[in-house]
Image (tube, coloured by chain):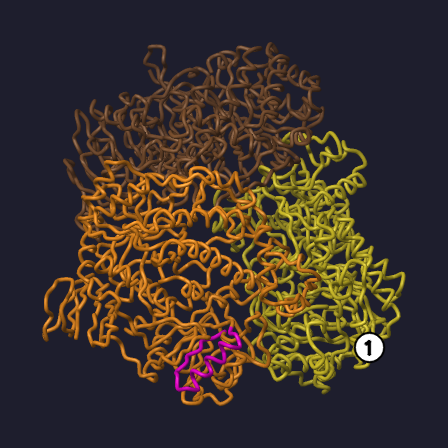
Chain colours: A yellow, B orange, C brown
Amino acid sequence: MRRITERLGGLAFGGDYNPEQWDQQVWKEDDLLMRQAGVNLATVGVFSWALLEPEQGRFDFGWLDAHLDRLHANGVAVDLATPTASPPPWFTLAHPDAMPVTADGTRLTHGSRDTYCLAAPGYRQAARGIAAALAQRYGAHPAVAMWHVHNEYATVCHCDHAAAAFRDWLRARYGTLEALNAAWGTAFWSQHYGSWEQVLPPRATQWHHNPGQTLDYRRFWSDETLAAYREQRDAIREHSDLPVTTNLMLPGYQVLDLWKFGAEVDFVGIDHYPDAAGVDAAADTAFGADRARSFGGGKPWLLIEQGTNTVYSASGTLPKEPGDILRHSLGHIGRGSEGALFFQWRQSRAGAELWHSAIVPHAGPDTRIFREAAATGAAVAGLGELAGSRVHADVAVLHDADVWWALDNRGLPQLDYHAALRRAHRALWDAGVTVGFAHPEHDLSGYRLVVAPSLYLLSDAGAASLRRYVEGGGTLLVQHFSGAVDEFHQARLGGYPGPLREVLGLRVEEYRPLAAGELLTLSDGTSAEGWSELLRAEGAEVLAAYTSGVMDRQPALTRHRFGAGTGWYASTRLDDAGYAALIGRVLAQAGVAPVVAGLPTGVEAVRRSSVDGGSRSWLFLLNHGDEPVRLDVAGHDLLTATEVGPDGLTLPARGAAVLRQG
Amino acid sequence: MRRITERLGGLAFGGDYNPEQWDQQVWKEDDLLMRQAGVNLATVGVFSWALLEPEQGRFDFGWLDAHLDRLHANGVAVDLATPTASPPPWFTLAHPDAMPVTADGTRLTHGSRDTYCLAAPGYRQAARGIAAALAQRYGAHPAVAMWHVHNEYATVCHCDHAAAAFRDWLRARYGTLEALNAAWGTAFWSQHYGSWEQVLPPRATQWHHNPGQTLDYRRFWSDETLAAYREQRDAIREHSDLPVTTNLMLPGYQVLDLWKFGAEVDFVGIDHYPDAAGVDAAADTAFGADRARSFGGGKPWLLIEQGTNTVYSASGTLPKEPGDILRHSLGHIGRGSEGALFFQWRQSRAGAELWHSAIVPHAGPDTRIFREAAATGAAVAGLGELAGSRVHADVAVLHDADVWWALDNRGLPQLDYHAALRRAHRALWDAGVTVGFAHPEHDLSGYRLVVAPSLYLLSDAGAASLRRYVEGGGTLLVQHFSGAVDEFHQARLGGYPGPLREVLGLRVEEYRPLAAGELLTLSDGTSAEGWSELLRAEGAEVLAAYTSGVMDRQPALTRHRFGAGTGWYASTRLDDAGYAALIGRVLAQAGVAPVVAGLPTGVEAVRRSSVDGGSRSWLFLLNHGDEPVRLDVAGHDLLTATEVGPDGLTLPARGAAVLRQG
Amino acid sequence: MRRITERLGGLAFGGDYNPEQWDQQVWKEDDLLMRQAGVNLATVGVFSWALLEPEQGRFDFGWLDAHLDRLHANGVAVDLATPTASPPPWFTLAHPDAMPVTADGTRLTHGSRDTYCLAAPGYRQAARGIAAALAQRYGAHPAVAMWHVHNEYATVCHCDHAAAAFRDWLRARYGTLEALNAAWGTAFWSQHYGSWEQVLPPRATQWHHNPGQTLDYRRFWSDETLAAYREQRDAIREHSDLPVTTNLMLPGYQVLDLWKFGAEVDFVGIDHYPDAAGVDAAADTAFGADRARSFGGGKPWLLIEQGTNTVYSASGTLPKEPGDILRHSLGHIGRGSEGALFFQWRQSRAGAELWHSAIVPHAGPDTRIFREAAATGAAVAGLGELAGSRVHADVAVLHDADVWWALDNRGLPQLDYHAALRRAHRALWDAGVTVGFAHPEHDLSGYRLVVAPSLYLLSDAGAASLRRYVEGGGTLLVQHFSGAVDEFHQARLGGYPGPLREVLGLRVEEYRPLAAGELLTLSDGTSAEGWSELLRAEGAEVLAAYTSGVMDRQPALTRHRFGAGTGWYASTRLDDAGYAALIGRVLAQAGVAPVVAGLPTGVEAVRRSSVDGGSRSWLFLLNHGDEPVRLDVAGHDLLTATEVGPDGLTLPARGAAVLRQG
């Protein structure tokens, strides 16, 4: 990001710009309004394939030349996108075999976007071709500041191309067919593969799929998607040394292993659309931002898309409230984003997303939305000095796509991993603590506390990593239904959580999910639902026991000293108060304090710190509540350009401040 | 209809008659029971294709000759149907390419009914063939009184025949491919079409479809269906000058533009099955009847199908209650139907609809149902004098299939247009006012009040029509989420409701749908749910403002003097009491009075009036409630053949009267 | 079963054993633990096709030889399964035409189990081949005690092979096409078949299917499945005279006519997984066991699969509670099972059912589950003396797959036949009475009471049988919506329940299903929901009338003396208390007493009796409740090997006793 923020002279503000949907008169207004709104970065070309390559192999760049020149002249840098998420209609007719196929064999066709199979050679060649052509044409264009490959990779295919690529991937992973048979446990249900050609994607079948097969298909598909990304990135790099990234979808999509993507992009870019309002939306913003920063290894990253208002989806997303545009933007920037971009600059008058909100709504610039967006642009413009600064987290929540994928299977106890991740993050956010995410196999020694919500699948390497962490003095909280299976989706034998048993000083004998609505009580007065386990302490101290039903007097909550550290275990899903109390206890033991002590609920504090050796930092204070709040803080507020003295600061309802300190 | 009622010497009573399901002994009983029940019109042949054309091109009319002769001898006229809704099994094998295909590519086959693609040449030729053969054979048969083309047109197909026909339709509509691209906004999501052959029906695709494409496909399919109807009608007309119609499905089906059908049939025929009981069923009957009359331009029409009792459907329709057979029949006749027909005469003992109720139930004629049906037949026989009379409505509710189709799309704010139409009609029905329906582009000057429930799509021509209407002195009530898009499904820019802004004196800046269960209150004490809008009065008087949340003190309800008329606007969905009060206010302003003042809830009054210059009229009074009610009315009751004098009339619970007045 | 229990020297205990999923070290532990747990019968080979026939036609028996020898040496007999429920992946590639096809044309593929069409010649030949090869190899192996064909027959297919076989079946059933047309009532909806090739399975079509076609397709498929079973059975018999059976799925699956299967297996084997906990699970166990015994004509049968704990399914089955392993096993044995087997011996570490519980769980033998299972093994070992004894029932509940299939249709009033069966059984179980099941066409004269819950379809022969039963002195309780259609799914004319009208002394004129949540009250104070009927007593005594709504004062509950017996009729679904009272009345009239009088709720008593002329019997007493209970019984308790004297017995909470008496 540094090259971009240096080029922009500060943080980025702007969004997707699709001038091909409008005419010259609108372009003129765009130039004017972009200046008014403080736009300095526009994402261009996301949906332009049909215009850039009107028929296979014939390119037309003239119209795009003109727009880039115009933007450049207007002081707006360009995030130039490859248009490969939306092949034009001619692509379908030229490559019918490259249309995606669902698990039940339905072949999709154009009429929407993303109608391609990422594993189809015809698609890959066409995508490389347009990416290379764009890079060759615009690699040296002065408007271009960065490259944006594709858009929201999130499709899956089950066609014969995908099957062939899956076999290649499996061959590379397992070497021999017997190793594959062993890994998938094909002795069960008579699934032994006698030749590679018998291996298929998990297509429509009679009952449950083999869970090893479905897990590997997810891994394969994520890798295949990443390979498609790398091909475009490498094609671009032949003509440009500008940073290359893609916009990852957070948080609901689960097609990709984002740790792997984080390692291949020059910086992480995300799209973020909260599916809640009020304080919940703010917590969701923090959840997305902390994940984005973590997937990039803590480096600065970029919010590439957010909405100014409603985004219509199947679940009927809520409108944003006044003040949200600024506060959500600051929520991301405070957690490491080097700017705030929107989808999109101008609300489409036609097409599938005509009701997706934008900076310039249908009603035009004389609107609440444009005014708030422009004010946010001005605010972001005042934050330039913190470009490159970092966010520090003492606490990590473990996140592993393998767990998500493994749990998304029939015939398993039901557990919503994503909800478990959000809940852990939310409890820590409510406690005022800054959180990062980590993979179990990462070096965790930099964290004072590591929380593992329902780490159903835990590889041998991950288990060894967690053991090293606790042995070395770390505090680890493991939650129920962890360590149940290994990386091949094979059960841990001899008692769960297998290789964590020594660390936690216990042995889980039996999982006992609870019926919907069934409540258990614990000896410490909290209640629990959804899950219980029959476990035996083997060295661990029992902090609370079950007090009802068949689990009466069995351990529920334990703590175990291991090496220089401590392993905590919660064998059930505590109620909100009980979970908050538990989080409070492990934070206290780990010696983790909130960013600002004593904040009321709904007031968020997060700090970015200078990395160049200085002690300078910037404290973001966001009041998501409906009441003004008095805070005992001091510094220079960049939003109002005023000094906050020893008397502290009153944050208005739904207000924000960014205090330079040190 | 006049030719038919003249021929029958009064109103029609009867229903679908399928003698091919029974034997000679039953036919004899049918003759007897039809006389007992007062049947004078039977719909014959709807499901007879397999018998009429046992193999392709070989016709067998002998059995039908016999039935028509028998009916004629028994004094029953025939509504002769073409059997094209149910191609026989041989048709599937002869024309596999004419079987319908779903959006995801599943090709349906026979085993039910309606297994054909209306756009398949093989089907169209076969349908024309059987229609022509019937007309040739029976064009001069003395039993035949009218023609009934097909049955309940309601299927859709996505096959290659449909695709080819869709392209032809688009070519005719847009002329050039560039016009199509502009209309559909294909610049978004890279959907630009480079050749006509790239254009497809909205088949299974990855995410949302282009909303212009889906809207045009609905329009095309309605037109294609109408073309199929016209082909049969024209084939019949070569051999017969009797009236031709089809039985339209009301109200749940949304495949057809019924305004267009209304213009092509000789009179409107409908099927009506309420999905509620009690007063709600009566209101639904009025809703269906008022629509039927309106689609036919106010002319007499015909209720071709209703049930005597339960019709089993996915939603589990309720049984009818004692008295409903008569009162529902009168509900239709009072609103312009020239009779009351049923599906069907005799309840099937086998087949997919064996639990669909009938005039003669499984249990035979010694039943409540047959007795009530026969009594209804006698009652209808007594109403012959009002054949040809008309129903007058001072109020119109706007109805446009385009709105329905446009809203039935992913990625849009959710709004149930059909429910909005029903709600407006119901509020007016509750107020005792007779309602018609109109299309926005109609000449509306004959109405004192026009209500536009959520006219999401509004064409330029429709907007001009509404403007003319208000300018000329009309009262117009526009409800929220109107004028959002034009006829191409492109957003109105500069503020909604676009071309109605001047008429209403306001500008809507932002739509803010509410979450499920979220309530807002207005300054007039009513509450609102589902929807809100941020709007500015630009000349309009604010009648009520929002008083809660982020909308506090923003206008909610407005009124604006424009030309000689008034435009009212409700920007949210008022609660039932609030909506009733608003309807009361606009009725008062428009000077519209109820048919009979002061009726209690659940008592319906509607009037048919002589069209031959006289002042004679017939007042239908229907008590849908469980208590007798005293009414201050006078006239000659055709049902009891008694005079109702100045002391008025007591309508018993669930009772009815038809008073000749003047 | 006698040959097996003689061979085992007592009842069977054990379960599915899949050693191919494990290694030599585990096999050694298996030998040891099986002895500890008292295992004497292991089901082997269910999922072994891929190992037994690694490629088409090449067999590898060596590994299985070794396991059978090892088991034999360890004193464990073998239930040898044919592996035909799980064709290996090579089968898919060799026989793509034998993969199953859904109604909408999706062709399934391997990746699960049961991916075959039972009607495909390629599959049938392969299945016969492996069955014959196994029988030839192991027909004389000393370990083998019985044969287990296939596993849980429960699949359906709609492919062209299925279509061809369906036509053959129809030709055999109806002889002529005209008879088929008459039976299906194809005159409706123009479905007349002009040639056999036009007849198809009920594939995806536009609206409802013909209900005769769907009913016949279900019958055909059950017969086709049975033919596939018989082919394997006969192939085995060429090499072995040991008993042959299959494990039938109870109770949720409705693919098979289990009466027909019961007649073809050497003894009935079932799998049983309750979908409830506590007393409900015990009642469900009794429901399954009574059905298993009845399908086998009252002969001893075998519980082939149950779980030790949770089985994860779409509905999220509950964990079992401590004590359930023993009490559920005794629940089955008390009702005639000659043992208790489990799926499976050792919990799979991989594959689709890795979370299906087992005797040896993932956590190993040092667990609650293994200890309870081993204790159950010891208990079963002590019950050897009752092998061959029988269970007597004075009451039969009628069960006919035709009713189930006929009701599972669109366009019919909704009624859950399975729930109705369970409700009748449960009310009788709650009354402490032992229940059998019977088909309407059976000779019912041995029962004092016959209950017919909603016998929607009733054949002429079934009606005659019921008439004979009542005429001969029986007590018959018929519940609402019975006798509505005949065996061709054609309505009974002239009044329901058609041929039962004389027996019941009434005539039902009209079915009036109630809306969800709608309640009616009866004159005896009970309430009713879901259903009502307009009926006339024609000789029957009216015991209670409806007292509300349009049904006011119409008969609801009747009783009619017919011949030497009595026919009761309940025209609605009584509330629980009302239904229990009605059951009490008919039991009293029929002179049926509970097994043990005065038992509190949740305490179950059932008796097995010696068949060799003696008066010896064994009384099973199961306390499913949470409180100890004092019982006034005497005998020798086989579980504790102690004498229960005249002071009686205290059954602990969740405890059991098996008293030898006489």
State the image quarter where residue B616 is shown.
Answer: bottom left
Q: Position of residue A439 (x, y in %)?
A: 74, 53
Q: Position of residue C114 (x, y in %)?
A: 58, 32
Number of on-image labels: 1
Name the residue rendered at 56%, 68% in the picture.
A318
Chain letter of disc 1 in the image? A
The amino acid on which the numbered mark 1 sits, given as a three-letter code, is: Asp
Comparing B587 with B612, the one in front is B612
Q: In screen coordinates, is A584 left or right of A166?
A: left
Q: Is residue C549 visible?
A: no
Name the residue rendered at 29%, 23% in the picture.
C444
The residue tagged with tag 1: helix, strand or loop?
helix
Q: Is residue C142 above or below residue B448?
A: above
Q: Residues within 10 Å of mark 1 (few under 14, many from 20)?
A: some
Q: Position of residue B637 (x, y in %)?
A: 14, 66
Q: In screen coordinates, is A476 left or right of B155?
A: right
Q: Is residue A299 above or below residue C385?
A: below
Q: Which residue is mark 1?
A: A69
Please say whether residue C195 is one of the residues in the magenta stretch. no
Q: In screen coordinates, is C448 left or right of C80?
A: left
Comparing B272 with C301, the one in front is B272
Comparing C87 with B267, the one in front is B267
Please say whether residue B464 is one of the residues in the magenta stretch. yes
Q: Position of residue C448 (x, y in %)?
A: 25, 25
Q: Quadrant of the C terminus of chain C?
A: top left
**Start and end of the magenta stretch?**
B458-481
Q: Is residue A441 visible?
A: yes
